[in-house]
Image: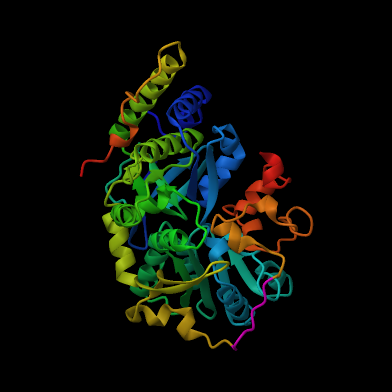
């Protein structure tokens, strides 16, 4: 997301989607700032990507990969001791 | 930062597949609810990569596909009026009604326009004060905030010539309907990530508890989907039935409170008929009385329309996960994206369109 603007009383921003830039309404995500990543649906930003959650999620994925590598080695299998991918509830 | 491209990483996907193979013991049927997930699964061949114990079936989460035929026919009747500019998302234009589609109506002179956002339709209304501008407001909870914002904006700016023909549907009642269907085979769900980005997933916790079914809120990239399957299989193998959030980088448990407030301001829950599925109680939205001056259902008198579906089309069975597109005798022959018999062959989120687009032109049994 880049420049902020206003149109007919609603907050807008320019959002880059790959090589395409579109104006997106921020009425439901008024606190985002340039540099943030947002999820846009039919011209409206409906969610902000949570960087901390994204980092945590990626660490879990890397651990799953490492566990699965061990599991395919002889005697490496056994009980499901991998970190629970399902334990990543957002903070509520 | 890891948001999108990383979720297409083949090595990470391979690690997840190995872990799924390690964990799975029994045969399981898992439904991905959302049509966007279906397209990703078919595009990347995820269903064919999974161990034979796991079957993925495709859900009803394609808003264009489940919009009732009566609503489509009503839209055509309104769009045909000379005083109307009819606006819609693009994939609605080729959806077959009882008497053709909106695209052919436009070919016969109707003013039918594609918009990117419902807010754009409000802009068209302001630029054309002597015309009545109608927006076809369809979708699941994901689209509801934008449609609500358009109505709020039209009322605030006094755009009296703007109205919306609303046919909103809700995911949780459709999951309940599938679980109550005689012959249901679905044992777990990959929940709709973008729907839950708006409304959160507390309602899904009630479903998981009531029906004893695992639900994993899942994203749309290959790694998202494989991780969602892994989380669902772990629950199934352990006998758990909980809601888990694979898509935590985007989805919070309570969703987006501002978006939910906008929805509540404009819409209220009502019974809805789903194309191919039938009536489901409390499964959609209607426009509140306070916004009645922008409700096309109230503003336009339309003659009773006799609806007619092609007898051969099995899209209703596909939408409930009971059959797959390749099971249909018309698939890829008399029914193609250029000549669709059912909405599932039209939409970017329809299962039949996904199978056709990515070369699944053989019956599902032969593809196994």
Residue B295 figure quarter: bottom left
Residue at the top extreme, as displayed: A74
Colour scheme used in the picture?
Answer: rainbow
Q: Do we see residue B228 in this rendering? A: yes
* Residue A86 vertical placement versus B273 (above, below): above
Judged left or right of residue A31, residue A47 is right
Residue at image point 55% right, 71% down: B68
Residue at image point 41% right, 12% down: A75
- Quadrant (top left/top right/bottom left/bottom right) for the C terminus of chain B: top right
* Residue B44 vertical placement versus B185 (above, below): above
Image label count: 0
Q: Nearer the viewer, residue A31 or B169?
A: B169
Residue B48 image point, x, y percent: 60, 35
- Quadrant (top left/top right/bottom left/bottom right) for the N terminus of chain B: top left
Q: Do we see residue A5 in this rendering? A: no
Residue at image point 41% right, 61% down: B176
Residue B37 image point, x, y percent: 51, 45
Q: Main secondary structure of the magenta part?
A: loop
User: What residue span does the magenta drawing correspond to?
Assistant: B303-309
Q: Nearer the viewer, residue B236 or B72?
A: B236
Residue at image point 47% right, 36% down: B26
Q: Nearer the viewer, residue B85 or B55?
A: B55
Q: Nearer the viewer, residue B148 or A5?
A: B148
Say whether residue B285 is magenta.
no
Residue B218 image point, x, y percent: 41, 43
Residue at the right extreme, as displayed: B333
Residue at the left extreme, as displayed: A92
Residue B360 image point, x, y percent: 69, 44
* Residue B318 vertical placement versus B138 (above, below): above
């Amino acid at each position: 997301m880049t420049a902020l603007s206003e149109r007919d009383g609603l907050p807008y921003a320019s959002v880059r989607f790959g090589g395409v830039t579109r104006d997106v309404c921020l009425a439901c995500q008024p606190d985002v700032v340039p540099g943030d990543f947002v999820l846009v649906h039919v011209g409206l930003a409906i969610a902000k990507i949570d960087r901390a959650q994204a980092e945590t999620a990626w660490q879990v994925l890397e651990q799953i990969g490492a566990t699965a590598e061990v599991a395919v080695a002889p005697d490496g299998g056994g009980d499901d001791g991998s970190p629970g991918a399902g334990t990543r509830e957002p903070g509520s | 930062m890891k948001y999108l491209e990383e979720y297409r990483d083949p090595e990470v996907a391979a690690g997840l597949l190995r872990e799924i193979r390690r964990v799975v013991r029994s045969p399981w049927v898992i439904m991905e609810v959302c049509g966007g997930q279906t397209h990703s699964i078919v595009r990347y061949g995820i269903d064919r990569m999974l161990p034979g114990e796991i079957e993925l079936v495709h859900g009803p989460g394609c808003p264009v596909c489940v919009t009732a035929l009566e609503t489509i026919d009503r839209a055509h009747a309104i769009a045909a009026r000379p005083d109307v500019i009819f606006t819609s998302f693009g994939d609605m234009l080729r959806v077959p009604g009882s008497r053709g589609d909106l695209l052919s109506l436009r070919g016969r002179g109707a003013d039918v326009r594609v918009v990117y956002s419902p807010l754009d339709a409000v802009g068209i209304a302001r630029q054309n004060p002597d015309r009545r501008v109608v927006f076809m407001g369809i979708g699941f909870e994901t689209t509801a905030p934008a449609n609500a914002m358009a109505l709020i904006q039209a009322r605030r700016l006094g755009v009296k010539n703007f109205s919306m023909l609303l046919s909103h549907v809700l995911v949780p009642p459709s999951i309940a309907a599938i679980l109550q269907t005689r012959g249901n085979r679905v044992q777990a769900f990959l929940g709709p990530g973008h729907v839950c980005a708006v409304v959160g997933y507390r309602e899904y916790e009630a479903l998981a508890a009531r029906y004893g079914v695992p639900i994993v809120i899942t994203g749309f990239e290959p790694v998202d989907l494989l991780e969602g399957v892994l989380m669902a299989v772990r629950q199934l193998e352990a006998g758990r039935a909980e809601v888990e959030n694979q898509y935590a980088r985007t989805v919070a448990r309570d969703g987006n409170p501002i978006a939910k407030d906008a929805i509540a301001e404009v819409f209220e829950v009502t019974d809805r008929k789903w194309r191919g599925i039938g009536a489901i109680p409390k499964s959609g939205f209607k426009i509140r009385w306070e916004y009645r001056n922008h409700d096309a259902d109230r503003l336009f008198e339309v003659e009773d329309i006799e609806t007619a579906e092609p007898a051969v089309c099995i899209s209703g069975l596909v939408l409930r996960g009971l059959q797959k597109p390749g099971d249909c005798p018309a698939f890829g022959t008399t029914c193609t994206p250029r000549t669709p018999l059912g909405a599932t062959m039209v939409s970017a989120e329809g299962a039949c369109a996904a199978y056709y687009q990515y070369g699944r032109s053989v019956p599902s049994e032969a593809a196994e």
